[in-house]
Amino acid sequence: MPVLPFMPFMSDLLTCESYPWKPLERGPSETALFPFSVKRYIRKGIPLEHRARVWMGVSGAQARMDRNPGYYQRLLQGERSASLEEAIRTDMNRTFPDNVRFRKDAEPCLQGPLYNVLLAYGHHNHGVGYCQGMNFIAGYLILVTKSEEEAFWLLDALVGRILPADYYSPSMLGLKTDQEVLGELVRTKLPAVAALMDGHGVLWTLVASRWFICLFVDVLPVETVLRVWDCLFSEGSKIIFRVALTLLKHHQASILEATSVPDLCEKFKEITRGRFVTECHSFMQRVFSEPGSLSRASIARLRERCRAQLLAQG
């Protein structure tokens, strides 16, 4: 993963100087529960210099941090868990090994802040502790915010409120549920792809689990992930399905050429690369048009049904 870039050709669109970004940094109460005009600006991309503050505001992380002064430091200074610390340490060198800022010889090295954020969150949320995938998410948050404490509270917003409650629990039931939800959406919107998957006996967990576990980190290009996360923090987890469906729909013809399970797995790797995903502005426009209607209510119903099916299967 490269150091976070900013696309020069996007400057006019992303600067949005006519829009007052400051109110968004103060949270939902300042934006009348985010009317469509606010969504429209965020969907065009939050300017890099405002991104951390806007994420903190629209997600509610800033408000929670303000209500809990010193809480992050108290978590770091509290009782230690050897098993939690060992689990986190195991993944340190696996986190963005190609990013110079996460290498041990970097100055400053971001492994220390990353370790602290994950350790604090594990103490904060005992039901989750630490789960693989959280290291990549926390790493991105540190790169964007340049603040351990803000990265912690944004991680809390994601894991604690924006995503289903048991997304990163030991059972990963929420994450497994969402993979099943994607399968149901594909069955409705892209039946030929669903039939191909069924024909080869391929489960969505085999080809798309990393999309969900890492929220597209190290799957899509950096700037594209940040644009997706702009919407994730402001509009909620429905954006994950929109992105997945857009990738599948745009590359449906290529996917349908697969003649074996290995071939199908390779197709799913290919669809996350290339110009289609690199040109983040046009990609995000398609994300909000190509999948068609996708309401919160329909996602909630699918989640409830798929969760019940998984629980029944034991």
Image (tube, rainbow, N blue to C red):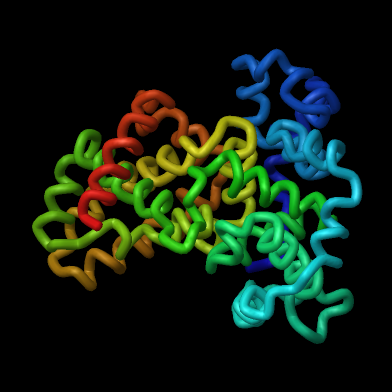
Residue at 24 percent of width and 55 percent of height: 255
* Residue 264 on image: x %, y %: 23, 64
Of residues 91 and 71, the one nearer the viewer is 71
What residue do we see at 73% from left, 51% from top?
Answer: 6
Is residue 139 shown left or right of residue 311? Answer: right
- Please say whether residue 139 is visible from this viewpoint: no
Q: Is residue 219 visible?
A: yes
Q: Residue lying furthest front in this view?
A: 79
Q: Between residues 126 and 291, which one lies in front from this camera angle?
A: 126
Residue beneath the point at 27% across and 51% down: 310
Q: Is residue 311 left or right of residue 79?
A: left
Q: Is residue 305 above or below residue 293?
A: below
Q: Is residue 96 left or right of residue 8?
A: left
Looking at the picture, tell me which residue is in the foreground, 9 or 135. Answer: 135
Vertical side of 8 occupied by 128: above or below: below
* Quadrant position of residue 292: top left
Placement of the C terminus among the 4 image quadrants: bottom left
- Where in the figure is residue 59, as x and y percent of width and height? 69, 35
Query: For the point 81% across and 31% down, which residue is it?
Result: 25
* Furthest residue toward left: 199
In the picture, the quarter occupied by the N terminus is bottom right
**x, y percentage for residue 153?**
74, 48
Total marks in image: 0
Q: Is residue 231 above or below residue 223?
A: above
> Picture quarter containing residue 89?
bottom right
Residue 309 or residue 134, whichever sits in front: 309
Q: Where residue 274 sits: x, y (%)?
A: 46, 58
Which residue is the extreme one toward the bottom? 105
